[in-house]
Amino acid sequence: MVFHAPARKIKGQQALSGKKIHDVMRKLYPKRNDYISAPELFEELVPELKRFDIDTVGKFKRLMKTHRRALLEDDKSRLSEMEIRYYCEWFGKKETLESLRKQRWFSYVGLVRNAAESEFGEQAGIFAS
């Protein structure tokens, strides 16, 4: 008798890639956070996550589901006037005000890095910089 693995299990065991990261994020997080389309930024995440043994789609999905609520709350939180001025200088006034208007701050790439830092501590934050 031949046993077949469930499709979900097979999909979860696939190796992580930049495209797969983007696909998972589009299923789990709001579209408003999908404003960076550069595939190379998603590819940069693969070795960063592999460093913490996040090397399959299933492990990545688990990481992003675990921290989903906190990440979305952080993304929607109001910025202080000082932070707004700082980000206007850093990213430009137009981009900062657009992000505030759309109530989104972090792109998918930023959300992934924030989740890694929440899960693995400062090591992940330092590695990503």
Image (cartoon, grey):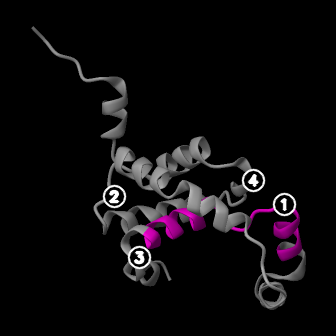
Q: Quadrant of the N terminus?
A: top left
Above or below 35: residue 6:
above
Q: Which residue is mark 2?
A: 54
Amino acid carrying label 3: it is Ala
Nearest to N terminus: mark 1 or mark 4: 4
How far from the left and from the top, in percent, is residue 124?
A: 41, 76
Label 2, label 4: how far apart the Cα atoms are: 25 Å
Q: Left or right: 96 with respect to 58? A: right
Circle 2: element type: loop
Residue at x 39% of width, y 69% of height: 48
Amino acid, disc 1? Lys
- Residue 32 is tagged as 4
- The residue indicated by pointer 3 is 124
* Number of numbered tags placed on the structure image: 4
Give the amino acid type for the residue marked by disc 4 in the picture. Answer: Arg
Callout 1: SS: loop
Mark positioned earlier in the residue sequence (4 or 3): 4
- Which tag, 3 or 2, sits closer to the chain's start? 2
Relative placement, left or right, of 1 versus 27 is: left
Q: CA distance from mark 1 to mark 2?
A: 31 Å
- The residue where tag 1 is placed is 102
Q: What residue is drawn where x is 33% and y is 49%?
A: 56
Q: Mark 2 or mark 4: which comes first in sequence?
A: 4
Query: In the rendered structure, which segment of residues is drawn in magenta?
Result: 96-118
**Of labels 1 and 2, the one closer to you:** 1
**Is label 1 in contact with label 4 (beta carbons under 8 Å)?**
yes
- Residue closest to the eye, 108 or 119: 119
Q: Position of residue 61 (x, y in %)?
A: 44, 48
